[in-house]
Image (tube, rainbow, N blue to C red):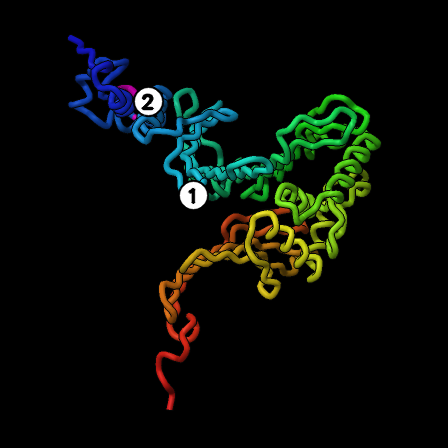
Amino acid sequence: MSLDIGDELGAFGDLTEAVGLTIDGELNGDWFLDPLGDETASPPGLASIVYSDHQRESLIAFVDEVLGAPDRTTDDGATWVPLFSDSGATVFAVVAADDGPARVGFGIEYETTGAAPTVAIRAHVPVFQLPRAGQTTLADTGSLPDWLVLGAVGGRIEIGAQVVISTASPTPGEAFLGGISVGLAIPTNPGDSFALDVELERLQLPGTTAPRDLALNVDSLADVGTDVLEFVVGILQAQADALDPSDPATAPFAALAALFGLRTTPGLPPFPLDDLLTSGANAAIAWIESIFTDDTSRDAWLAALADLVGGTPNAGRDAIEFTAGVVTGSVGVRVSPAAGGGITITPWVEVALRPRSGSEARLHADVLTADTTDASFGAVPALSATAAFGRDAGAASDLLDTP
């Protein structure tokens, strides 16, 4: 005897499919005898929600339907399910199931609104993996638990940024750049590789009549002719130098160009294009070291970053500070010598809440450590929370008077 109830449950029909209570809309009577089922979906139940492709997709569909707009999207084989949005930022659950185990992590998107120029930022952090149908063996994570992806080979943190400079149509024959996209893949295991992708969008060179996209990455950079690459970057540098950083319409691109050494900026060394073509990644590492080991260059680089994201540079802390009511935030960098002769760069973030003078709660996190000696990375090496009261938290006097 079968009972078709899937169509009558609406969104909750996806939930009953996800937990195994129904199979293709028909009631699964065996579920009441064993609701957990088997982790290999024989029979389906709570234990096989991630293992079974059908159950997993049903769960994603249910969550997406219940939470409402915006709808889930698929990007490069991964499903991004929006969980909540606030102040232009959206947090996602990210589920990827290609040829290997099902991987689950979190993502965040932020995009400015209004007319160009606009900035969009996206980040994805994979967290754990579970076996799925057709792939029962989890990838080797070394000394880590086999379900943990972060810290294992393949558990790279992905960060992408896109700046749309102009949506207008370029004038034929004149230099033009519609936007620029930058993608980073930051390894969390020394055995993994770092990746960088840069795309110049709607780039039009002088004398040409139509724009084109030009993509550069560490794998294909050697295939790009030296003369062509130098010419394109030279045009980009000339256009970046011509931008007025005080003009709101061009200020974001001027700041981004300064960060990558593509714009003449006092205190910042230009990006070593010639050395990059002959020495590869070592030239880029040496350029980074020259910035972060020199106080003037480091301050200039942080000032350019502050121009891009907003905030106030604090040279004494090597940081950019933000204030919103009783909440203050800081983004900074700490540099120290590395054992192998290079340097260790540690970006950090800090958030403080001061509801009244004399009391403060503060959260500090080191985002990652990067060692230029061997290009190794470590994710979230330190996290601390503190509370302060009295003069250290802005009070006019100590809590206790010492006779």
**Mark in front: 1 vs 2:** 1
Q: Position of residue 274 (x, y in %)?
A: 82, 41
Q: Residue at x 61, y 54 (%)?
A: 345
Residue 336: assigned label: none
Q: Amino acid at mark 1?
A: Ser
Q: Amino acid at mark 2?
A: Ser
Q: Nearer the viewer, residue 134 or 325?
A: 325
Q: Position of residue 207 (x, y in %)?
A: 81, 25
Residue 87: assigned label: 1
Q: Real-space Cα distance between discs 1 and 2?
A: 30 Å
Observer able to see residue 382: no
Q: Secondary structure at mark 2?
A: helix
Specify the principal SS of the magenta part: loop
Seen in the image, is 20 located left or right of residue 75?
Answer: left
Seen in the image, is 364 located left or right of residue 67?
Answer: right
Seen in the image, is 60 located left or right of residue 324?
Answer: left
Q: Is residue 90 above or below residue 367?
A: above
Q: Residue at x 79, y 26 (%)?
A: 173
Q: Secondary structure at mark 1?
A: loop
Q: Nearer the viewer, residue 85 or 75?
A: 85
Q: Quadrant of the N terminus?
A: top left
Q: Which residues are magenta?
A: 39-43
Q: Farthest residue in the bottom direction? A: 403
Q: Position of residue 294 (x, y in %)?
A: 71, 60
Q: Nearer the viewer, residue 366 or 393?
A: 393
Q: Farthest residue in the right direction? A: 227
Q: Is residue 80 above or below residue 9?
A: below
Q: Earlier in the sequence, mark 1 or mark 2?
A: 2
How many numbered circles are shown? 2
Q: Quadrant of residue 136?
A: top left
Residue 58: assigned label: 2
